[in-house]
Image (spheres, grey):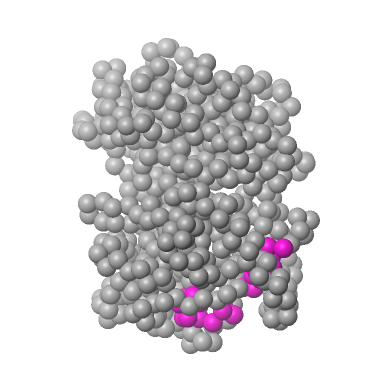
């Protein structure tokens, strides 16, 4: 499209064409049963781990590994290592795994790209400085002794709920990863590694001399305490009765088997699924035994084969994609359009109403009623997906959805954080009161992502849903949630975005919630947020934010604008009653100008996050449905001559 000047307003006919093209481009991505699913991409870690898994099992698929090798080489950064997101700085742990995977695939250590990688890894401290999960992988391949991994005795499975460390007190993703890993750490299997590949060249310390190395947790009183516990556990581990260990293994197997989740796998996430595969193999399950075969099929389901590369996804996101695409289509074509009707019908069939998942440990009397992120993950629905789906069902207006919406309302209200304190009134993603902050100091938690505390973006989504279905702002639950959001606002007017990048995402989410709850544009929290969003708009009219804003990069800034982050900013400003602000017109012009002839947008940067500073995500659907949502909402506001949006999302 022809570029617009920074002050030019998009003509009505051009806006119509942009919306129609985007809606048509999104509609053709719909599956025959009405749902949407787009690739979800992380860094090189997951495809590298998959290659190592094949070599652990000696189930090597040379053709597949060759295609993965193409992808791994393409991800190598100019610094020689591998980043956690496009154009990011070297990440040591990711680089060690990517290098090891390429060695297993057959890349010679004297190849130019391998020499560059090795030099970069050694300059960063060597493989001995990698994180806990990487050192556990190296221990499985005999590259470091098991003393390089923090003590995690299998007998953890026996700990009572009141104990300071209990598996129910860590996040769902940590729990599903840890349980099968406990078996691996306890039994210490050795990878088959049929080609005998090692990576001793990546160590500055002789590998056999490597000991545990955890930087963060030792810097606090809790860290020193848990380090002392680690020392005691290492000394006493041989003294634990064998029957305790056998029973602990049985409990771990029962935990995993109960949650295998068909071909969606344990927890629906790659690390947990891969650990379950290795656990079953270590325990002697034949590959065709039902649990082992199911786990292996779940791993294979995550392989993404594209014409020019093959990679492995950390998980699948059909519920999230379908709900968000449904909102965009409802905005563009109306809630009664076939795309929205079909999406809602598919989503309603995915509601979890029978299984009291792990969240029920804290809420034993609460009826299930949520949605998971994946196709099926009944033990682990999340309130973010549930709120977004609930808003779409309500928006579509079919009386058949009434019971599903009521179940969702009941479940979300039951999951609200209680007990006073900073987290009171907020929502975590998967479980209530998952705020045992002392556990972030255990040696095993060097990634800093062990817990699932309430966050602004998830809380905002819950507020939006509850307000949309009629809950007033003075309802006690709503009042507590709004108070949480007010407390969480940053001094500059933004909000932190836990599950999207970052302050733009968080600020958009909260402004939508405040609008839905009836908090007007004159409220100081809204005024500050609007001023901040306007202040970080880029010269081209768009918005962009670096993943490094989770570290020390400036908030709301990046070297380029992105379609998804521009859409969030525009949606946030419109929710704040600023639809007529010049910044909105410029943002809309940016989206129209950068739209491709086929109605889609290009977006290479990562704009989402799994674990801040550890694991980042690129949702391939974000570049499609968020710009459409923003353009269509802007058109609706212009046509309706209104100042605020009607829905909380």
Magenta run includes residue 154: yes
Q: Residue at x 71, y 22 (%)?
A: 474
Q: Quadrant of residue 92?
A: bottom left
* Residue furthest out toward the top: 640
Residue 477 image position (x, y, % from top left): 71, 29
Residue 351 image position (x, y, % from top left): 53, 33
128, above or below 46, in the image: below
Q: Residue at x 69, y 81 (%)?
A: 238
Total numbered badges shown on the rendered structure: 0
221, 467: nearer the viewer: 467
Magenta run includes residue 357: no
291, 395: nearer the viewer: 291
Is residue 319 toward the left or the right of residue 623 in the image?
A: right
Which residues are drawn in magenta? 138-158
Is residue 643 toward the left or the right of residue 216 in the image?
A: left
Residue 1 image position (x, y, % from top left): 21, 31
Residue 280 image position (x, y, % from top left): 51, 65
Residue 124 appears in view: yes
């Amino acid at each position: 499209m022809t570029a617009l000047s920074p002050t030019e307003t998009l003509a009505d006919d051009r806006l119509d064409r942009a919306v129609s093209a985007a809606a048509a481009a999104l509609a053709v991505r719909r599956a025959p049963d009405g749902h949407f699913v787009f690739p979800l991409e992380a860094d090189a870690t997951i495809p590298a781990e998959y290659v190592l898994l094949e070599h652990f099992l000696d189930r090597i698929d040379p053709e597949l590994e060759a295609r993965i090798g193409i992808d791994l080489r393409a991800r190598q950064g100019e610094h020689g290592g591998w980043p956690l997101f496009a154009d990011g700085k070297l990440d040591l742990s990711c680089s060690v795994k990517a290098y090891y995977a390429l060695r297993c695939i057959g890349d010679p250590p004297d190849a130019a790209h391998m020499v560059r990688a090795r030099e970069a890894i050694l300059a960063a401290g060597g493989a001995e400085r990698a994180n806990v999960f990487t050192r556990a992988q190296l221990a499985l391949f005999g590259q470091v002794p098991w003393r390089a991994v923090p003590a995690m005795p299998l007998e953890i499975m026996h700990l009572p709920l009141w104990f300071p460390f209990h598996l129910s007190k860590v996040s769902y993703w940590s729990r599903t990863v840890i349980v099968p890993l406990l078996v691996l750490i306890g039994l210490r299997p050795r990878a088959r590694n049929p080609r005998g590949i090692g990576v001793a060249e990546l160590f500055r310390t002789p590998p056999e001399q490597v000991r545990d190395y955890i930087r963060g947790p030792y810097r606090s009183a809790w860290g020193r305490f848990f380090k002392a516990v680690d020392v005691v556990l290492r000394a006493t581990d041989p003294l634990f009765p064998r029957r305790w260990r056998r029973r602990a293994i049985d409990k771990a197997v029962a935990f995993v088997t109960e949650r295998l989740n068909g071909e969606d796998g344990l927890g629906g996430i790659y690390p947990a699924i891969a650990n379950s595969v290795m656990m079953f193999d270590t325990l002697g399950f034949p590959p065709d035994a039902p649990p082992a075969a199911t786990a292996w099929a779940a791993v294979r389901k995550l392989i993404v084969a594209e014409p020019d590369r093959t990679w492995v996804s950390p998980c699948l996101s059909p519920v999230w994609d379908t709900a968000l695409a449904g909102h965009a289509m409802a905005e563009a074509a109306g809630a009664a359009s076939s795309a929205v009707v079909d999406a809602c019908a598919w989503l309603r069939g995915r509601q979890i109403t029978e299984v009291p998942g792990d969240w029920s440990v804290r809420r034993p009397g609460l009826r299930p009623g949520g949605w998971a992120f994946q196709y099926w993950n009944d033990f682990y629905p999340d309130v973010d997906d549930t709120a977004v789906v609930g808003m779409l069902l309500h928006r579509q207006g079919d009386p058949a959805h009434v019971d599903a919406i009521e179940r969702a309302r009941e479940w979300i209200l039951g999951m609200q954080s209680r007990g006073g304190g900073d987290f009171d009134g907020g929502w975590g993603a998967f479980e209530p009161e998952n705020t045992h902050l002392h556990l972030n100091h255990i040696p095993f938690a060097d990634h800093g992502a062990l817990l699932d505390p309430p966050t602004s973006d998830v809380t905002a989504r819950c507020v939006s849903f509850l307000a949309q279905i009629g809950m007033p702002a003075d309802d006690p639950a709503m009042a507590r949630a709004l108070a949480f959001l007010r407390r969480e606002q940053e001094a500059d007017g933004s909000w932190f975005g836990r599950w999207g990048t970052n302050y733009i995402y968080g600020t958009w989410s909260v402004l939508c919630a405040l609008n839905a709850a009836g908090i007007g544009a004159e409220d100081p929290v809204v005024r500050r947020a609007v001023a901040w969003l306007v202040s970080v708009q880029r010269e081209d009219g768009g918005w962009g934010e670096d993943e490094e804003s989770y570290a020390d990069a400036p908030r709301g800034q990046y070297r380029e604008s992105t379609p998804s982050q521009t859409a969030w900013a525009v949606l946030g400003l419109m929710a704040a009653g600023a639809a007529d602000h010049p910044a909105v017109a410029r943002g809309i012009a940016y989206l129209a100008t950068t739209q491709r002839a086929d109605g889609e947008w290009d977006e290479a940067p990562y704009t989402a996050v799994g674990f801040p500073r550890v694991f980042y995500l690129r949702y391939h659907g974000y570049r499609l449905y968020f710009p459409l949502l923003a353009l269509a909402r802007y058109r609706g506001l212009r046509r309706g001559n209104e100042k605020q949006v009607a829905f909380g999302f």
